[in-house]
Amino acid sequence: MDTLIGALLALVSAFGWGTASVLIKLGMRNKSAIAINIIRLYITTFVYISIFLITGKYKEILSLSPEIILVTFISSLFGFVIGDYFYFNALKLMGISRTVPITSSYPLWTMLWAWMFFGKKIITQTLLGALFIFLAIVIVRKGGLEERLNPKGFIYAILAPISWSIAIVLLDFLSLYIDPFALAGLRMTSAAIGISVFLPKYSKELKGVTKSEIGILSGAALLGLIIGQYAFVKSVSLVGSHISTPISAINPIVSSLLAVALLKEPPNSKIFVGLILAVVGVVLISTVH
């Protein structure tokens, strides 16, 4: 039963993340990636803190050791500040349908860190998955050159999954010590604190945010950072990242198809081939036992 529930939760996270990507694209037409991230993290943190206060969940967080809180803070920075900064800039420079095949390589990097720091063996299935992802990146890059893909955006799209993978490795560790809902909320709160260093620089831009932009980003925060992130953390705690990650990896399909259908981003065959290869590679790597 846990396996079924964990798989369903991972599927929920995939749809939450995929839909949130499209909403973020809509909400950042005239705003910087940092400003967008500040808004959505503050919205999410407000929701989590309110729930913690109402339910008394804050007592569990206050009882955690300083070491666990520090690791949670580091994980949140890599996942929601550093990684998402690169991701949002890539979205703005290249569009969703070109960005997501590249950023879907995060399980590859996760496997690399697991091998380097935890001694996990790299078997044939892992190498095959890496090959699929490498081919996906080459194909998307080639298509981008023909369509004047932004080189800076491409670099951002590579750096985003590297940052996310560090956060995921730490998440696997943290889920052993913290309740999934408390962990999800603590990570969001830590990310909001971390990104606050940018407030002085972006205060003028934040004051110019419209009500419609707040509405769009609230929807993205709800789907991606509240529902999506909690579902993923809970899924990992139930079945482990080796099951949760490949299922949640379908989110590029959701976002790319919505981008083409709703945002009218021009697709081409290389983008779809790269997307398919990336997802296949993600599944191969993430299902290694």
Image (cartoon, rainbow, N blue to C red):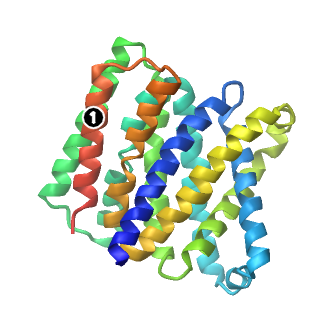
Q: Residue at left 71%, top 24%?
A: 30
Q: In the rendered image, which quarter is residue 51 located in?
A: bottom right
Q: Where, by quadrant of the figure, is residue 9 drawn? A: bottom left
Image x and y of residue 239, in percent: 36, 73
Nearest the eye: 252 or 168: 252
Residue under the image location 84 percent in, 42 percent down: 200
Q: Is residue 215 visible to us here? A: yes
The relative height of residue 120 versus residue 63 in the rendered view (above or below) is: above
- Number of labels in the image equals 1
Where residue 263 sits in the image (x, y, percent)? 53, 24
At which x and y percent is residue 47? 74, 61
Left of 280 or right of it: where is 262? right
> Is residue 187 found left or right of 247 in the rendered image?
right
Location of the C terminus (image quadrant) = bottom left
Residue underneath mark 1: 136
In the displayed structure image, the side of residue 133 where residue 158 appears, left or right: right
